[in-house]
Each structure stands twice: as structure tokens, then as C-alpha cells.
Image: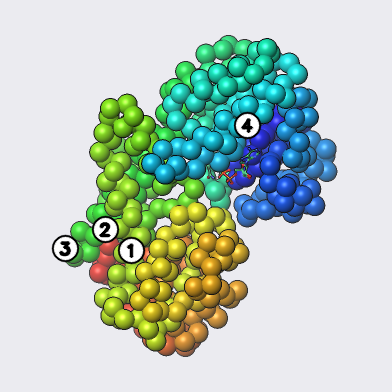
Amino acid sequence: MKITVVGTGYVGLVTGTCLAESGNQVKCVDNDTAKISCLKDGQIPIYEPGLEELVERNVKGQRLSFTTDLKSAVAESTVTFIAVGTPQAADGSCDLTAVKIVAGEIAEAMQGPQIVVNKSTVPVGTAELVTEIIQSKTEFSVEVVSNPEFLKEGAAIDDFMKPDRVVIGTRSEEAARTMRELYSPFVRTGKPLMVMDPPSAELTKYASNALLATKISFMNELSRLSEKVGADIGKVRQGMGADNRIGPHFLFPGVGYGGSCFPKDIRALSQLGKENGIDLEILGSVDSVNDSQKRVLSEKVVSKFGEDLSGHRFAFWGLAFKPKTDDMREAPAIVIAEELVKRGAKICAHDPEALETAREVIGDSIEYCEDPYEAAKGASALLLITEWNEYRGPDFDRLRGLLKEPVLFDGRNVWNLNLAEKHQFEYYGIGTRGSCDV
Ligand code: NAD
């Protein structure tokens, strides 16, 4: 099939590349000329494991190309994906500006019937809205399909190639047939491809993200109680997660969720509720628990070193909102850095992939370091913020020699008290005073 993907970010680039890998002719379009020229030069603008090789192979195989020219790309395609950003508007709702602009441009470019697939995360009613925009500008017929994306940054290729499920929102049998054909290489192992009405598909995406964020905030809130009453949230998690009705996933406490999806999607769903006269109370709490959780690690630092942190330097391990990505959008590290810097602390941070993106967001208020041990030199304590695998088994003796004081604040419970004490560190985890392994 000839396919256009408009929006060549985390979702669009992965979608386009994976669809090319399964034999389609794909043009990835973006209005960011720097991004497109970088891709044309063979450089990948984001860090996503496995993506570079896959892009290279499909470009070489002439199945994948990049352009800023939406008009000619759409004119040659039968299916056009919309994968542009849908950021948060000032009132918390989903800002559909880019989706609407692209819908208008697609309509003006169409040279025949078209299936337009909405991959961006959008509120209920957007498939209808996009249909109206396109249909008001062209005589050609259009079917707008909702096809929300569930990939996780850091495992995006695998998630796209082997999805848990594919959700297709359409009332058109023909569009459903085309989508089944397109996705058949990815659901060969029997994973479900579910066809439903567009509103249900649109809501499925928000509902999924909202429940995942709820699990995180629930565990984060419980971790605070756990610490107070002398329980170990890690043990509680295991005990809960063994229950089949609960399951072990997404129960890890930490320094709060971030990223380009959970924060804005929770607020957009809340706003959608309000617009429809439903106060989604749980979501308000999920959001506010998350806000305060981002301050938990800095509060522990303040309890240990006092409100005035001038004269202290702290090492950060990890800046990205999660491992295996360079994405800094709404990363807890931003808040933790702010909280410490405003009290006079200096920070030296390491991240395996996100130093450049972090610099764009945090700026010069902190220092950036290419080597994790360099970052620890002379620091009053080390704060682990993102659980990159390379931080799991550090050379503790070397670390102790470099730090001014042997103090660890573990924002992801990657280590534990026993291990830290074995290496003569003072240890502060999340939701635990100590582990009582017997
Ligand atoms: P992104 O910001 O990485 O990419 C969006 C791209 O769209 C950018 O490259 C931007 O230049 C381009 N763009 C914006 N307006 C355009 C226009 N008028 N014409 C052409 N290109 C335009 O965003 P993302 O993370 O890929 O997210 C895209 C959508 O997918 C969002 O709705 C998001 O909520 C959703 N989503 C994201 C993830 C994720 O993990 N990032 C997962 C699932 C769903």
C-alpha cells in the first residue's frame, strides 16, 4: 500500500518505519524542515532502541522516504496517517490545532478517495471533526479511522511490531478491511485486532493511560504511608501483584510519572469529563498525587541536609522521564532539579541519552556530565532518578571514594538498604525504611 504518515515524531517515525518494514511504500511528512533534512541525511532525531537500523534498511530498500511536501505525498497515497502532537491546552484540554491544520491540508491534497487514520491521541469526537473538515474542502470521499497508538517509548519498535492489541475505530467495512490488511503482519500471533465505533476507540486510549497513571499514583501514595508505618512498599507490591486480579505490572513506586502522554492525557480526559458534565474525581487525585510525588526525593534531601543547600553539590543519575529514551517532556528530574537549585544546591547530572534534550529543557542551571562517576565527584549525595540498566550494578566502592558523603537517594528503588549498608552507604529509598529479607 502507498501510505503517508504526517508527523514524524516518536509515533509517526516508528509507525512509518514499521509499516515500511512490512512491505508498504511509506512517506513520512513533517513541517519541521530541520527534522526532515536530518532524516534525509540518515540521522535519527530521537533515541529509540532499534530504530536507526530499521530506518536505514527501509530507506535503502526504497520503501521509506522523508519529505516536507505533504501535498504530493498525500496525492500518491490511499491511506494517510495523522501522527502530529496533541499537546495540552491552557485549560488542560487536548489542543487539536495541528490535527485540524493537517486535516485541511490533506483535503486540499487529495486526488481521489482516501482513508485518513488518526493515530494521535485525541478526544472523543475527533474522527467526526476531521471528517467534517476534510469533507468541507473536497468532493472526494474520505473515511476517517481512529487508530490510537499504545507504544511505549524505549520499546516502541517491539510494541508496534508485536502489539498487545490493535484498536480500529470505524463504521466502514471497507476501511476496516484495509486496516486489517495493513495490520495483519503485526497480529499474526493471534493478538486481537478490535474493530469498534470511533468514539469507543478514542476513549479506549485515554482510559488505558488513565488507569496506568492511576496505578502509579496509587502506589506512590501508598509508599508514603508505607514509610511512615514501617512497611516496605517493595514487599507490599509483591504481595499485591501475586493476586491474579491485580497483576504485577505498573505497581512500582518512584518519583512520579512524566513523559509526553500520561500528564496531558489525564488532564485531557478530566476536561472531556467536565465538558460532558461528569467530574472524573479519581483523575484529579491521580494528577495531584503525581505532582507532589515529584517532590518526594528533594524533600528527603532537605530532611537530611537542611533547607539551605548552598555549598552542597548533588549528583543526578538519570534525567529522562524513563529509561531507554531521550524524552524529557514532564520528566520528574526537572522538578527535582528546580527544588534543589532554588535552595542553593549545585547539580551535576548524567544520563546515557538525554543530556542534549535535558539541556534544552533545564538549561544552564545545572551541569551535565558524560560520565556517571564524574558526576559523583565531590557530591554530598547521589540521587538516582531514572532507572537506566547501567545504574543497577555500579562500582559502589569507587562511588564511595568519589562522593563527599556516602549517601544515596534512590528514587526508583533500584538498590536497597541491605545492599547499600553492605557498601557502607546511607540509603533513602521510596516507601521503605529498610528491607527485612530473611
Ligand atoms: P512528537 O512531538 O514527537 O511528534 C509530532 C510531530 O508532528 C513533530 O515532529 C512535529 O514537527 C510534527 N507536526 C506538528 N504539526 C505538524 C504539521 N502541521 N504538519 C506536519 N507535521 C507536523 O509527538 P509524539 O510523541 O510522536 O506524539 C504524537 C501523538 O501520538 C500525540 O497525540 C501523542 O499523544 C500520541 N502518542 C504518543 C506516544 C509516545 O510515547 N510518544 C504514544 C502513544 C501515543
Residue 229 - label: 3
Is the C terminus in the top left, top right, bottom left or bottom right quadrant? Answer: bottom left
Position in image of residue 51 (x %, y %): 67, 48
Would the CB of label 4 be found within 8 Å of ligand 1? Answer: yes
Along the polypeptide, which appears first: circle 1 or circle 4?
Answer: 4
The alpha-carbon separation of the residues under discs 4 and 3 comes to 54 Å
Q: Residue at x 62, y 24 (%)?
A: 116
Query: What residue is pinned by disc 2?
Result: 223
Residue 325 in sight from this viewpoint:
yes
Eyeballing the image, is 120 above or below 33?
A: above
Query: What residue is pinned by disc 4?
Result: 102
Q: Which residue is drawn at 41% across and 68% down?
A: 338
332 and 208: which is toward the camera: 332
Would the CB of label 2 be found within 8 Å of ligand 1? Answer: no
Position in image of residue 189 (x %, y %): 58, 30
Q: Which colour scheme is used?
A: rainbow
Identify the amino acid type marked 3: Val
The alpha-carbon separation of the residues under discs 2 and 1 comes to 14 Å
427 and 136: which is toward the camera: 136
Please state which of the two labelled residues, at mark 4 or mark 3, is closer to the viewer. Answer: 4
Along the polypeptide, which appears first: circle 1 or circle 3?
Answer: 3
Please state which of the two labelled residues, at mark 1 or mark 4, is closer to the viewer. Answer: 4
Identify the amino acid type marked 1: Arg
Crowding around mark 2 (Cα neighbors within 10 Å: few <14, some 14 to 19, many 20+) is many
Query: What residue is pinned by disc 1?
Result: 295
Q: Are marks 4 and 3 in contact (CB under 8 Å)?
A: no
SS of the residue at dot 1?
Answer: loop
